[in-house]
């Protein structure tokens, strides 16, 4: 062919586009609309977190508040700072806590996996459905939010208990002779979490799948892919941002979930959210409870930050190669 | 147009008439294909034969069915009735991934998560080609479209023209028997489009792969194709070489769609084997046409005269009995190489004439409000009956 068809990629901006609009708003305009909500979020995340962090370094005492102060004037002369790591040692020394952490991670991981396996085909189906019913299907996904979360979890007790709807139906249908023991097992917790968080998986997946150009799939088939392979080679990699977002939205709250394991999981299900509750309200050991909360945050935030920096590095690498 | 393409046109013409000893083998046979979507008939009983080595254009306005026909060749749509054969094999119900054809999409449909090289290699890998052969073929294809240095870029890092080349390289990589191109130049600017037209033709002739191009741009079809099919409302109106399509349109629609034209409507007054005479109320004298037509006297027919075949002069033509009229120059459109004159005839009818600008003078010989004689040779009129 003749010489290059128009050298570099077009990145010229239209003079009247975004740039001019920002200028009209004033330099700080864009910064302001971002800064105010972020300040709000940061304030109401950081302030409670710092309080919890402070309590985690205190010691339990009988009184109001039920912990020793961190900073204290001794004899009106010396400023005394007393930090105790006892709660943390206690945390790692006691197998109960370690087990509860790992069990929470395990339950959150598999719940996320089940939600993904269930949510992906649903999101795909909605995204490919006829335009006229697509909004209806989406509405059906978010419809449960119109009732209280608590009531919906209670409803599952009625479904899963020994003489509940599910067991009665299965026995009536002759599938089983004796009721299945589901309520107060981990199985019930999985069912509850997957049920409650499924919309958070579906919505981000839907928005990436819906945006996808169908001609890409046709191109893959045209170049020799059977439909299933075209899905693996094109649809799946292109929906990765939706998968990551959906998994984060399910995994993170599922780790610390309290209501579902408490109501459906019974006494034997060990999850960190329940332990936290027990420390605060049953044992009234605020320092220990705070240490649990801080450790949970660290365990969750650190891997996520590592993952994100890994992604950023991958992208930078890809750019360098290009 | 190359001489090679011209001789192919002649060979196709001889094959169609069945008079050649070196008959061409039909590569694509479309037999009575109809496609309906609900009540809408997108393609209506189309039959078409395309030969090996042709650059065949499907031309028509939007919604005429040309894209649906192309998609049926690719396998993305299944005909409601009729058959499609490619290289003698019935492909009517064969899925796209088992057809010996590839498609270049209007949107290019490049995989955004793959590099240029991975895009071009995609189809080859599906065929299980060994890795070193894949690498070699990819390099070959990228050289062909002069993008060898951009193999590791992602599609979003390329310009529109570069993306178009990647799409072409990817579609050609598997050496398909037929390459289907859906508006291949539609997204390019005019200058780039004109250059790319010629490049496409060069690549097509060098590789010897049959191209079927869908386009709405008659100039593009005229520049590139060995043959053109004009479609309207799901039907094919005419299949011909660009030359025959322009000079011998078979319907008023084709005459008007393929270039600009002055159409004069009137009853057939005289119908002889060697000539016909048409009475036209828009002109002061009847129209004489130097060929016979198959119609009957009194029927309404249309005489089509291309603007560049009309002469304008201040003096009356030598023979004023036929094919002339008088009017006033109403508008002049300067186009560089030529100018378009709009002449208001005494009947009120507007006639378009294109004249070459042979001098650099800014004062044309004819100017606004000049009274002129409009005339044309009787051999330059085409009569169509519908």
Image: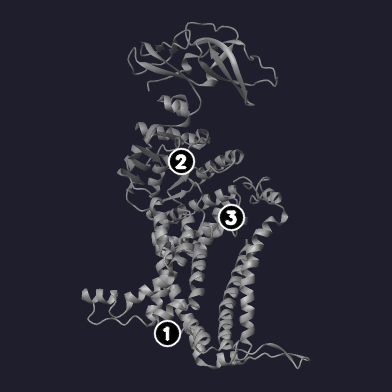
Q: Are marks 3 and 2 on the same chain?
A: yes
Q: Are marks 2 and 1 on the same chain?
A: no
Q: Do the CB atoms of the residues marked 3 and 2 lie less than 8 Å apart?
A: no
Q: Name the residue nearer the viewer: B179 or A274.
A: A274
Helix, strand or loop at mark 1: loop
The residue under label 3 is B156
Judging by the rendered image, the residue that carries numbered circle 2 is: B214
Distance between mark 1 and mark 3 Cα atoms: 50 Å
Q: Nearer the viewer, residue A216 or B323?
A: A216
Q: Please state which of the two labelled residues, at mark 2 or mark 1, is closer to the viewer.
A: 1
* Chain at numbered mark 1: A
Could you tell me which chain the residue with mark 2 belongs to? B
Q: Residue at x 64, y 49 (%)?
A: A10
A264 lies left or right of A257: left
Question: Element type at marker 3?
Answer: helix
Front residue of this view, candidates A138 and B356:
A138
Task: Name the colouring of the figure.
Answer: one colour
Residue at mark 1: A269
SS of the residue under disc 2: strand
In the displayed structure, would residue B313 be above or below residue B172? above
Figure check: B29 above or below A109: above
Position of the C terminus of chain B, as image quadrant, is top left
Foreground of the two, A218 or B48? A218
Mark whose residue sits in front, 3 or 2: 3
Q: Residues within 10 Å of mark 2 (few under 14, many from 20)?
A: many
Give the alpha-carbon distance from disc 2 to disc 1, as whole Å. 65 Å
Q: Position of residue B236 (x, y in %)?
A: 38, 34
Q: Position of residue A109 (x, y in %)?
A: 47, 77
Position above or below: A63 against A153? below
Specify the subunit that label 3 lies on.
B
């Amino acid at each position: 062919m003749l010489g290059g068809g128009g050298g570099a990629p077009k990145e010229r901006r239209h003079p009247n586009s975004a740039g001019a609009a920002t200028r009209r708003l004033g330099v700080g305009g864009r910064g302001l609309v971002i800064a105010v909500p972020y300040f709000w979020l940061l304030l109401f995340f950081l302030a409670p977190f710092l309080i919890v962090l402070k309590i985690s370094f205190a010691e339990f005492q009988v009184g109001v508040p039920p912990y020793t102060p961190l900073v204290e004037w001794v004899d009106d002369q010396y400023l005394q700072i007393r930090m105790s790591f006892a709660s943390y040692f206690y945390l790692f020394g006691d197998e109960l806590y370690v087990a509860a952490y790992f069990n929470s991670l395990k339950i959150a991981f598999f719940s996320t996996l089940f939600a993904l396996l269930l949510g992906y085909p649903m999101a795909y189906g909605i995204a490919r459905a006829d335009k006229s019913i697509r909004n209806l299907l989406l509405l059906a996904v978010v419809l449960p939010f119109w009732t209280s979360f608590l009531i919906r979890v209670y409803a599952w007790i009625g479904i899963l208990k020994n003489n509940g709807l599910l067991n009665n139906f299965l026995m009536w249908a002759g599938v089983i002779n004796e009721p299945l023991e589901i309520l107060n097992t981990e199985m019930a917790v999985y069912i509850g979490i997957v049920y409650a968080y499924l919309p958070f998986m579906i919505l981000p997946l839907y928005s990436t799948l819906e945006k996808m150009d169908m001609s890409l799939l046709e191109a893959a088939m045209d170049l020799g892919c059977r439909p299933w392979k075209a899905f693996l080679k094109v649809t799946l990699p292109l929906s990765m941002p939706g998968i990551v977002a959906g998994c984060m939205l399910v995994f993170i709250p599922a780790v610390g979930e309290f209501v579902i394991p408490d109501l459906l999981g019974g006494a034997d299900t060990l999850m960190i959210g329940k332990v936290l509750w027990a420390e605060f309200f049953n044992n009234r050991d605020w320092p220990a409870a705070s240490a649990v909360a801080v450790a949970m945050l660290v365990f969750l935030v650190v891997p996520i930050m590592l993952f994100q920096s890994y992604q950023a590095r991958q992208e930078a690498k890809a750019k360098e190669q290009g | 147009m190359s001489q090679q393409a011209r001789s192919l046109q002649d060979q196709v013409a001889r094959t169609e008439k069945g008079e050649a000893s070196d008959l061409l083998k039909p590569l694509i046979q479309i037999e009575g294909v109809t496609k309906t979507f609900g009540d809408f008939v997108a393609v209506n009983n189309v039959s078409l034969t395309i030969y090996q080595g042709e650059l065949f254009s499907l031309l028509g306005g939007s919604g005429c069915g040309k894209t649906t026909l192309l998609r049926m060749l690719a396998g993305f749509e299944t005909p409601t009735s009729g058959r499609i054969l490619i290289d003698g094999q019935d492909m009517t119900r064969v899925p796209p991934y088992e057809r010996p054809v590839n498609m270049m999409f209007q949107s290019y449909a490049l995989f955004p998560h793959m590099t240029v090289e991975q895009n071009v290699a995609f189809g080859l890998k599906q065929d299980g080609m060994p890795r070193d052969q894949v690498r070699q073929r990819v390099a070959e294809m990228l050289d062909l479209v002069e993008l060898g240095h951009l193999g590791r870029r992602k599609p979003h890092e390329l310009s529109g023209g570069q993306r178009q080349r990647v799409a072409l390289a990817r579609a050609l990589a598997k050496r398909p028997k037929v390459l289907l191109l859906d508006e291949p130049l539609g997204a390019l600017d005019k200058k780039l489009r004109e250059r790319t037209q010629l490049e496409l033709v060069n690549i097509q002739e060098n590789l010897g792969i049959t191209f079927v191009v869908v386009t709405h741009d008659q100039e593009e079809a005229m520049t590139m194709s060995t043959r053109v099919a004009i479609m309207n409302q799901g039907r094919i109106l005419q299949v011909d070489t660009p030359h025959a399509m322009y000079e011998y349109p078979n319907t008023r629609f084709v005459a008007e769609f393929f270039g600009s034209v002055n159409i004069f409507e009137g009853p057939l007054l005289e119908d002889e084997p060697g000539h016909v005479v048409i009475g036209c109320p828009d002109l002061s004298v009847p129209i004489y046409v130097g060929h016979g037509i198959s119609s009957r006297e009194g029927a309404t027919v249309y005489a089509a005269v291309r603007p560049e075949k009309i002469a304008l002069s201040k003096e009356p033509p030598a023979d004023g009995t036929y094919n002339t009229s008088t009017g006033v120059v109403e508008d002049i459109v300067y186009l560089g190489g030529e100018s378009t004159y709009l002449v208001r005839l005494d009947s009120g009818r507007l006639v378009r004439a294109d004249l070459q600008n042979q001098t650099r003078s800014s004062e044309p010989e004819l100017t606004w409000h000049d009274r002129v004689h409009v005339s044309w040779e009787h051999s330059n009129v085409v009569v169509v009956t519908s």
